Image: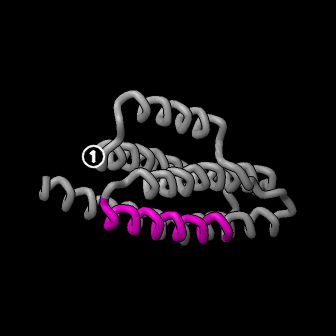
Amino acid sequence: MFEKSHDIAVLNSLIETTLDSIDGYRRSAEEATSGRFASEFLARAEERRRVVEELQQEVRRHGGTPEDDGSVLAAAHRAFLTIRDRVTGSDDKAVLAEVDRGETYLDEKWQAALRDDQLSPETRSVITRNYDSIRSGRERWEAVHRSFEAAS
């Protein structure tokens, strides 16, 4: 028997992490010196916003209250980055490294949810469908990162 409370907890965890991703991409767009990167980051943030909306809808369907804020850990990390940037400055390479780190974490979190054998089939379907978006965004990100490295 599948428990709605478990589905809601997993979905809210993915929402929280994906909200962190949105915040990270928006911040990266602000810090990027290249307009090309800034527009790419904003596109990724918008794509992730749509994913969050679908996950929030699924939480509501289960009778839960969807997460609507990122994690405390992400807020602490952003504060650290702000301090670091004031001391060392920020450039596209540093911004890209942070995005890469965030993408890796997000991908791992989604993959862990997909391996969860306690999810209902409906919730698993929603997660799988949205993971396709997360994965394609990661693949697009990796292509952008490779092109930056090749140009450097």
Per the image, label 1 sits on a secondary structure element best described as helix
The colour style of the image is one colour
Q: Residue at x 17, y 53 (%)?
A: 149
Q: Amino acid at mark 1?
A: Lys
User: Quick check: 121 above or below 92?
Assistant: below
- Residue bearing the label numbered 1: 93
- In terms of depth relative to the viewer, which is nearer, 14 or 29? 29
- Quadrant for the N terminus in the image: bottom right
Residue 125 image offset from top left, x and y in percent: 60, 70
Residue 71, quarter of picture: top right
Residue 76, quarter of picture: top right
- In terms of depth relative to the viewer, which is nearer, 32 or 3? 32
Give yes or no for residue 45 being in the magenta stretch.
yes
Residue 87, quarter of picture: top left
* 130 on left or right of 10: left
The span shown in magenta is: 34-53
Residue 115 image offset from top left, x and y in percent: 53, 52
Residue 44 image offset from top left, x and y in percent: 46, 66
